[in-house]
Image: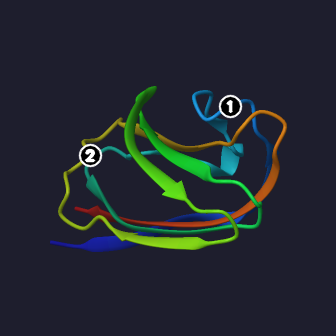
Amino acid sequence: MRSTPRFLQGVYRFEGKGLDAPALLDAALSYVVPDGVTMQPVYLRAGNSAAELVCLVLVRDGQPMRYFPVGAKDGTHVALRVVEDLEPGTSIELHAAAPAGVSATVVVDLGLVEIA
């Protein structure tokens, strides 16, 4: 069995449209599980520069999979290892939400592992 780490990461600025209205932060935070492997999310680390709560949402095939609240001017680290396998062809994206009108910068690092 061979495993390959993958990372969706970066620093992203966005404007909130409501905590109930998450949107894709950036196209670079999208990933499709390749043929011949399964994938597991391993961890999410995130920081929030805003004075308001933001919420990161891991979206699988267009549906919310996991929610990660990140406190005002705070950070979070969530271990996800062995939560579930994602099959080939599954798409995941990292979305963000904040209260309407709140400008926020988030630092995100989503660790994934492909298993062949």
Q: Residue type at mark 1?
A: Gly
Q: Quick one: label 2, few (<14), some, or many (20+) residues within 10 Å?
A: some
The quarter of the rendered structure image containing the N terminus is: bottom left
Residue at the spot x=61%, y=34% of the render?
22
- What residue is shown at x 24% (from left), y 68% (from top)? 81
Reading the image, the residue beneath label 2 is 86
Name which residue lies at 50% across and 71% down. Answer: 76
Given residues 87 and 21, the one toward you in this image is 21
Q: Residues within 10 Å of mark 1 (few under 14, many from 20)?
A: some
SS for dot 2: loop
How far apart are the alpha carbons under marks 2 and 1?
29 Å
Q: Nearer the viewer, residue 81 or 39?
A: 81
Q: Secondary structure at mark 1?
A: loop
* Residue designated by label 1: 18
Q: Position of residue 94 (x, y in %)?
A: 55, 46
Q: Quadrant of residue 52?
A: bottom right
